[in-house]
Image (cartoon, coloured by chain):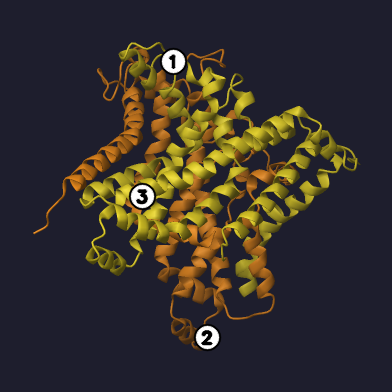
Amino acid sequence: MMRISASRKLFFVINNLILIALVLTMIVPLLNVLAVSFTTDLESYENTIKLFPRQPSIEGYVTLFQRVSILRPFLNNVYVTIVGTFLHVIICSMAGYVLIKEKFFGKTILVYAVTIPMMIPFEMIIIPVYITVKHLGLMNTLWSVTIVGVVSTFSILLMKNYFEGIPKSLEESAFIDGAGESTVFFRIYLPLAKAGLATITIFQFVVKWNHLLTAILFLNSPEKYTLQIALKSLVVSQELTSTTQSVANNTRMAGIVIAIVPLIFVYVFAQKYFIKGIMIGAVKE
Amino acid sequence: MLYLLILPAVLYFIIFTYFPVLNGFRISFQDYRFIGASKFVGLKNYIEAIHTPGFWRVFGNTLILGLSNVILTAFIPMFLALLLNEVQFTPWKRFSQTIIYMPHLFSWVIVGGIWIFILSPNSGLINILRSFFGKPSIYFMAKESYARTIMIGVNLWKQSGYVCILYLASIAGINTELYEAAMIDGAGSFKRALYITVPELVSTLKVVLLLNVMGALRIFNQIYVMRNEVIAPKIDVLMYYVYDRGLAQFKLGYASAISVIVFVITMIITIISLKLIKYKI
């Protein structure tokens, strides 16, 4: 027996109109990019709104892989992302496990040692980090972009949170059976913290896949380039500044599409972990 | 054994965070060279920074862009979350949430690339729409007057979905009894939003403001990707300046001095805002 007032109806309409407009401002640019990436070279320069290619074509993608040779940076990126994410998950969960232990010698110092770096933005130490990487002989290697940024306080604290939720009785019985710390960690804690592992894995996946600043700093030869830095010169080349603007719009948009697809894939399959991670992140930081 | 498990993380932070912080501080007092001895020059780099007009220009740009980002990406997503919260049809609500979060996943190269294309003079969506209404085409990315608005707007486009989800999650945590009591008292949905939801969101707003403030002086990727020589004077920011002076022109001591200045300012602003918003860690 709800009576809906006229003003309520009006609000309902306006509210949904605003939301539709909002969703369109997010979707239309993406559809436009996708459509242009599948046009012919010629059509990609036309002054028409393209949300669907008139003559679907893969010319853009062919140019991207043959003439722009994006395959090498793409594979480099896959390598850096997989190795970097794997190391990140292992190192951060090991550290998180240590932090749940009852008082032990040096615990306070270790807690500070891994928490303070959260206050130090990477952008503000690029010069000395550059020098460190140079001294370590890592300049222009894929290891440089894999290692720098491989540990984060955020993930350590997130794993610590998950481990704290695991009942102590489990580890106690394992210790009585004579298991060591590493056995308890790998056999009991890691398998029981799958949701936490999933969260830091996908977050680090996105971070590594999108890494740009470290590539700008440490990589200087095209065969070492990772995806973002290779795409930068292609995708954002503005007619105004570039003298050799010979790549058609469809190729530039194809570059964007291949960089987005893995992200959307991960997002669609792991959405619940994203939301969870965002919340914990905001509370923790 | 326990120490061995945490060793990699600690070692990483020593090599790639603590040592660089100290080293950067030291270099800022030097005329640093890669080869040969670096000479200590006292405060010369700092004095040079203060007397360089270019430094103050990027400082001003950073403040303008940073402050706009801090405010807009805190309040607009809050407004959006309140609107989304009134949607009754769950699949539509979930769909729009999913969509507006998406740009946050993309790198700045992608987001910059998308918007430079959309704003481009001939085949860009905006100018096609303009010509449809008989208006002349504008080369947005080559106009100083549009530069900052574009940077702020695109940043909002990228980040607002993420911040919006923070608010929505915190709305979901509000005690429903509050709303029921308000409905019995005859409060309409507008009053309920204003007197129950908004006050309950204040603590989330504080967190968002704090995160935004800490990020404000770090802006780099967006500018690196979207800048060009025409609009650079309006949008070059501190961190881009550090990168350019330090690693393109190899004035490492000078660039380090500026990093130290920015770092100290960030710390001061963070502490002040912690005090202002009475944030309890």
**C-alpha gap between disc 1 and disc 3:** 34 Å
| Subunit of label 3 | B
Instruction: State the mark number for residue B52.
Output: none
Q: Quadrant of residue A31?
A: top left
Is residue A199 among what the camera can see?
no
| Subunit of label 2 | A
Residue B122, given in percent of the width and then of the height, sits at 41, 14
Is residue B63 among what the camera can see?
yes
Helix or strand or loop: what does disc 1 sit on?
loop
Residue holding disc 3: B81
Instruction: State the mark number for residue A178.
Output: 2
Q: Chain B's shade in the image? A: yellow
Between disc 2 and disc 3, the foreground one is: 3
Query: Which quadrant of the rendered structure holds the C terminus of chain B?
Result: bottom right
Contact (Cβ within 8 Å) of mark 2 with mark 3:
no
Crowd band around label 1 with a 10 angstrom C-alpha radius: few (<14), some (14–19), many (20+): many
**Which residue occupies the foreground of this view, A80 or B266?**
B266
**Which residue occupies the foreground of this view, B143 or B121?**
B143
Q: Amino acid at mark 3?
A: Ala
Residue at the image point whose x is 45% and y is 55% from the top: A201
Q: Quadrant of residue A151?
A: bottom right
Residue holding disc 1: B121
Give the chain coloured orange: A
